[in-house]
Amino acid sequence: MTQTAIPFLFMRGGTSRGPYLKRAHLPEDLDTLAEVLIAMVGSGHPLNIDGIGGGAAVTTKVAMLSKSDDPWADVDYFFAQVSVEDQLVDFKPTCGNILSGVGPAAIEMGFVLAQSGETPVNIRAVNTGAKVAAVVKTPGAHVSYEGDARIDGVPGTAAPVALQFMETVGGTTGAFLPTGNVKDQINGIDVTCMDVAMPMVIAKAESFGLTGHESAADLDDNAAFFECMESVRLKAGELMGLGDVSKSVVPKFGLLAPAEKGGTIATRYFMPWSTHPTMAVTGAQCLASCVLTPGSVADGMARLSNENPATVTLEHPTGKIDVVVSYDLTGDGVVIKSAGLVRTARKLAAGEVFVPNSIWEAN
């Protein structure tokens, strides 16, 4: 054969989609692994015409699973963000939407034995070290994808996947506030640099002359805004100890504005070179944490209750997402303990995906 066959599941996880693979079926070397994933997805063409990607950042994501050696976890989840056109692979971030499918995939792949009714799956996110407790619906000890749960950005309903994120603070930078400040000023724009589930640079939409309620398409057409945002992001990356982030999707960028649709606050999330059509699960946790932090750029913008855990409802381009955050307020600010969300997932296909032997030939 002139191509290497790699077994895979093709799944929607939350509002993202991509192949789910066993780590053992892939090359150990990260450089070779990147070449395999580029070929698999078809990076290098806007439609990913020579691969199984979907021509958007939310459809060029890859999940790689393995049995965990962590006493707490059942499965390790290693994530890769493959670029649509630039033939780049970023192993730094994780993805909470794709993580929504890890529990069902772990059962389908045989890493976890299904129980009758519901099956808990403890997941370690390898990229960031976060721990996530998932609960998957398994009536009759089989994964069920049908149900009444609805998430904005996905048509129809499906079985709920409950996710509880723990130990997410400082996973990449080592600190809740990587710059040491709750607020910094970069290029004359006030920002909060925060690392909860995903390192982010967060600013008010009005600081860029925006309302914060623009559609994703309108924002993507605003080249002047992206140029200004990227300049701020690059400088923030250095301040956060991440070095040169010009070729990394980390840190991500978020904008905040007063809510208009009954939520806590309006948000827009950037991946970072395009606008997320909905909202990232990891980004949602970071934005919700920013909302709860006194003195951040969100201070005074949000409709907050005194409940703890607090439900923070983020408005995004196609609807809303709820984040339930357990936290403590201290003299030094806020301490994030955990964040819970409900997502859905669905198995779309299963089989083998092929890459040329010239890129990698499995032994």
Image (tube, rainbow, N blue to C red):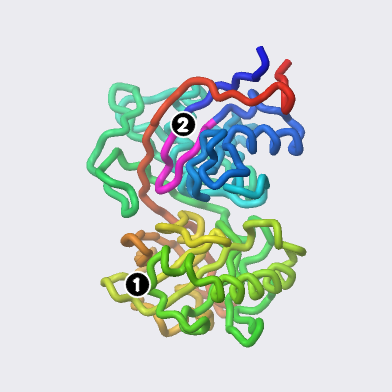
Label 2, residues with CA under 10 Å away: few <14, some 14-19, many ≥20: many
Q: Is residue 158 visible?
A: yes
Query: Residue at label 2?
Result: 10
Residues packed near mark 1 inside 10 Å, few (<14), some (14 to 19) or many (20 plus): many
Identify which amino acid the numbered label 2 is placed on.
Phe
- Is residue 16 located in the magenta-colored stretch of the structure? yes
Q: Are marks 1 and 2 in contact (CB under 8 Å)?
A: no
Estimate the spatial distance between the alpha carbons at disc 1 and disc 2, rounded to whole Å: 34 Å
Q: Residue 182: percent from the left, percent from the top?
A: 60, 79
- Amino acid bearing label 1: Thr
Residue 48: x, y in percent? 54, 40
Q: Give residue 21's quadrant in the image.
A: top right
Q: Secondary structure at mark 2?
A: strand
Q: Nearer the viewer, residue 276 or 265?
A: 276
Q: Which residues are magenta?
A: 10-20
Q: Nearer the viewer, mark 1 or mark 2?
A: 2
Query: Which residue sits at x=40%, y=82%?
Result: 301
Q: Quadrant of the N terminus?
A: top right
The label on residue 264 is 1
Residue 278 magenta-highlighted: no
* Element assignment for label 1: loop
* Residue at 25%, 44% in the rendered image: 156
